[in-house]
Amino acid sequence: MNNIKIFVADDVSENGLLPLRAAGFTVEKRTGLKDIALKMAVRDCAGLIVRSETKVTGEVMNEAAKLRAIGRAGVGVDNIDVAEASKRGIIVMNAPDGNTMTTAEHTFALILALARRVPQGYCSLREGRWERKRFVGVELRGKTLGIVGLGRIGRVVAERARAFEMKVIAFDPFVSEEAARNMEIEIAPLEGVFARADFLTVHTPLTSETRGIIGAEAFKRMKPSVRIINCARGGLVDEAALYEAIKEGRVAGAALDVFEKEPPPPEHPLLTLDEVIATPHLGASTKEAQEGVAVTVAEQMRDYFLTGAPRGAVNMPAISADELNKLQPYMRLAEQLGKFHAQLTDDTVRDVNVHYAGEVAEMDAAPVTRSFLAGLLRDMSARVNVVNALLIAEERGINVTASYKRVTNEKTPCLQTTVTTKKNETKVAGDLFGSGGGESRIVGIDGFNVEAMLWGNVLVMRNADVPGVVGEVGTSLGRRGVNISRFQLGRRAPGQDAMAIIEIDAPLDAESLNELRAIREVIDLRQINFS
């Protein structure tokens, strides 16, 4: 295998590279290269391994005609142009779970340090003072730890908390009560976690929905003795609101490893408070973690070149290029349907079924099912993609099935998706239109024949089937300067409930949505964003 050359552009653990060397690959490591020097170094390489320092741009790929795989020895791939790599048929892989233990341990280190005021006591002692009464802390035993996000890190934190005899409650809409009970964790609504937590730690990805999830309104619901911990992502905690809450005595303290802007400016308000302790994004900074992610990505790259197995891939399913080309329109449709379901669903998902009809039913549609799950679970985990979506669903206790109807008529949608929660069941049908199936549309919701494009901003409204509803909705939107591009109506029979899908040119704010929901005939109204 000496014809396979791997270039390592960042300071990756030498021990981590042993799987590649043992497989007979040529491994060259030179760090700190920029611009032309980097481009020249990767010209004859089949694989490239980086950490966060090297930026793998389209320009770099232009010079790497032989490049087939890029490995990121870490969690994120922000420094890699994944879209450009996908266009070029280059697999991009990372080590999404390599930092689980070290980040969880750092979280608990901050919980302990915050509870016992360890950094403040140390600084006081170094300044020559002996202030035992000033730094009285609190015990963890008997306290309630609230966890927002029960992914792998959140679960490890919960295990450690139980060892300290803490009660653990958590919010995660993708974890069933049964699965949580097996972990000795109580699942509660987000507001309930806010109200009951003595310590509150957040472990969710940063998305448009989770940005500022711990903010001013959340602080109003919390105990004044609560302590906030964030080792996940800067932006999950509203830093300005946290500062005000601490100053006003509504929050007892905070421990932060991440900030909205890194590094934070020296004059950052939170860094002026005695109640706040902070570390410079050290969650993944252990020798074991750095070596572990290097080994993981090296083994993944080795296996890909030896067997074609795309373990840890973020941009390709495990199918041939020819099959992928045929399935891509269905995969795009499925992912958009998943996003649609995610924004219709408030409760814990229990079961998912994807029913295939027509041409797609004649193919191996597993990548399409994974694409649906990737859309459905996108706000639950930053690491979800078509490769690991099934695994993440399994972790969350979601039962996933697929069914096929190989002989069908033209009116049968190619995809019919069903998501079942503890409270209800939602069915959405989608189909492909246009040349080569390039246009994805919804063609049915819960038995209502309605049609809408799967892009932009959409309102989904269920209402009483009486005269005047369309006019009231249009008038309300018109007053707020929002243009309706399409208004699709569906009903089963006159006088029963009706369904409308309203495509609008701009998203609505909370006040506009509440005005529409206040219309007497409106039973339910949701805003869906396909970005």
Image: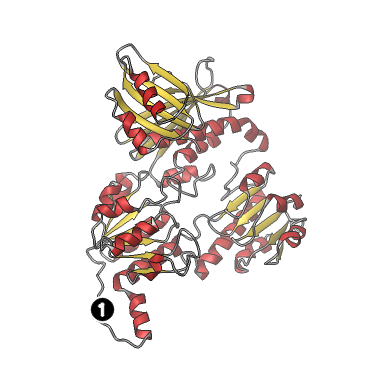
Q: Which residue is mark 1?
A: 134
Outermost residue on the left side: it is 142
Outermost residue on the bottom side: it is 128
For the image, the number of numbered tags is 1
In what quadrant of the picture does the N terminus appear?
A: bottom right
x%, y% of residue 4?
73, 56
Q: Can residue 316 be seen? A: yes
Outermost residue on the top side: it is 494
Whether residue 317 is situated above or below residue 441 in the rendered picture: below
Report crowding for label 1: few under 14, some 14 to 19, many 20 or more residues within 10 A (C-alpha): few
Determine whether the residue tagged by mark 1 lies in a helix, strand or loop: loop
Whether residue 2 is situated above or below residue 172 in the rendered picture: below
x%, y% of residue 142?
22, 64
Task: Locate residue 85 relative to residue 479 in the image: left or right.
Answer: right
Q: Where, by quadrant of the figure, is residue 444 drawn? A: top left
Residue at point 40% right, 33% down?
527
Residue at point 35% right, 33% down?
513
Amino acid type, callout 1: Arg
Q: Can residue 170 be seen? A: no
x%, y% of residue 190?
30, 48
> Closest to the observer: 508 or 409?
508
